[in-house]
Image (cartoon, rainbow, N blue to C red):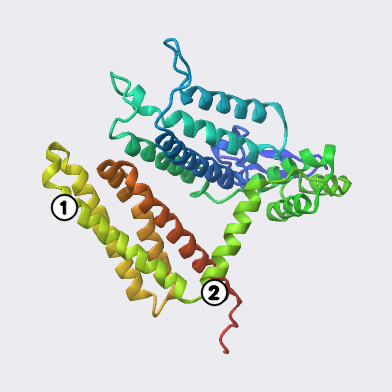
Amino acid sequence: MRAMRTVRTDGTARDDAARPAVHLLLRLGLPRDPLATRHLATFLVVTALTVLVTRALLAAAGYPQLGGGGLHVAHVLWGGLLMALAFVLLLSFLGPVLRPVGALVGGIGFGLFVDEVGKFVTSDNDYFYEPTAAIIYATVVALGLVAEALHGRRPRDPREALAGAVDEAVAGVVGGFSGPARARATARLEEAGDVAGAAQTRALLRAVVDDHDEIPDLVDAVARGTVRVLHVLVRARFVPWVAVVLLVLTSAVSVTRGILVWDGLGGLWWVAAGAVVSGLVGAACAVVGLVRVRRDAVGGYLWFRRAVLVSLLVTQFFLFRLSEWDASWGLLVDLLVLGVVGAELEVLRRAREQAPAPAA
């Protein structure tokens, strides 16, 4: 079978068989946003915080109701309005500028919406339905896993990097480039390499004028500040070990809590079993990390990271079902430990990359 040949614009021929395979999403014209993981993380974190803050404020105020005369304006309606506002913003403007705002507004809206899920899965509209916390947590985790499947399992195609550079240029051609925006666009273009369209995009970026005004990105500022704080913490060598100790303790607490309530759960014994088994798995991962960290620091901390992820993705679901909203403290500890472990991993990897090669 003969390979098909395509004639380039300069008149030379090219074998189509030599062209790299194109992923289905790219064939459909759906390149992934290079900053999508940050926007999705913002959406999910803000969703979870909105639920926690809403529950806390309602409890402190005695669960007031807005309305009267037989009407009750539930906060699910405000959540729907905020999600609609996020859609209007994201569908109305080109370019990357409003995506952080859309993620923030949409996260608040979805948090207000999902907080009232108990009313819509019970026949008596019970806001205090016991499994509500577990349902909300499972929803956020499921969305996080979907985001990971979309963005974390397949390396970015050079054409997606080029699309990211062009996306940055969309804002630049009308408003100019700030320093960070130009740096982002240039980095995407360098990542794209010599794919078709790179030369034209490079010329476009050079034509964009400089502009020192930029819409403040609150999400980026918080993220950078958090990273700086975590890096300062891991410079104090005892802090990562404190995080590991907290990790082991939370696994022990999960196992103990599951064992103590097992007999009183009746038909829900599987919830306690899930907390015990997942807690043991997390503790086992932490122990493997402790054994390995002395001879392979990066490998050891990867096991610590696995232990935290087991707790976040599995154990916390069962704990929320067991103790409802009290489990949120364990969630906060897990997130803190994950941040510290991630920062330590970055420091260790950077040190390994910068270490001089052994002499021949």
* On screen, residue 359 above or below 73: below
Extreme-bottom residue of the structure:
360
Q: Give the alpha-carbon distance from disc 2 to disc 1, as whole Å.
A: 39 Å
Quarter occupied by the N terminus? top right
Q: Position of residue 164 (x, y in %)?
A: 69, 44
* On screen, residue 135 above or below 262: above
Q: Position of residue 167 (x, y in %)?
A: 72, 40
Extreme-top residue of the structure:
69
Q: What amino acid is at disc 1? A: Leu
Residue 89 or 34: which is nearer the viewer? 89
Mark 2 vs mark 1: in front = 1
Quarter occupied by the C terminus? bottom right
Say which element carries label 2: helix
The quadrant where residue 39 appears: top right
Q: Position of residue 107 (x, y in %)?
A: 53, 36
Q: Position of residue 332 (x, y in %)?
A: 42, 53
Residue 318 or 174: which is nearer the viewer? 318
Residue 344 in sight here: yes
Residue 348 in sight here: no
Residue 135 or 286: which is nearer the viewer? 135
Say which element carries label 1: helix
Residue at left 39%, top 32%? 62
The quadrant where residue 43 appears: top right
In this picture, residue 204 sits left or right of residue 193: right
Q: From the image, tell me which residue sits under label 1.
A: 260
Q: From the image, tell me which residue sits under label 2.
A: 235
Residue at left 30%, top 41%? 324
Residue at left 64%, top 45%? 160
In this picture, residue 272 sits left or right of residue 294: left
Q: What amino acid is at disc 2? A: Arg
In this picture, residue 262 sits left or right of residue 228: left
Reading the chain from its start, which is encountered first: label 2 or label 1? 2
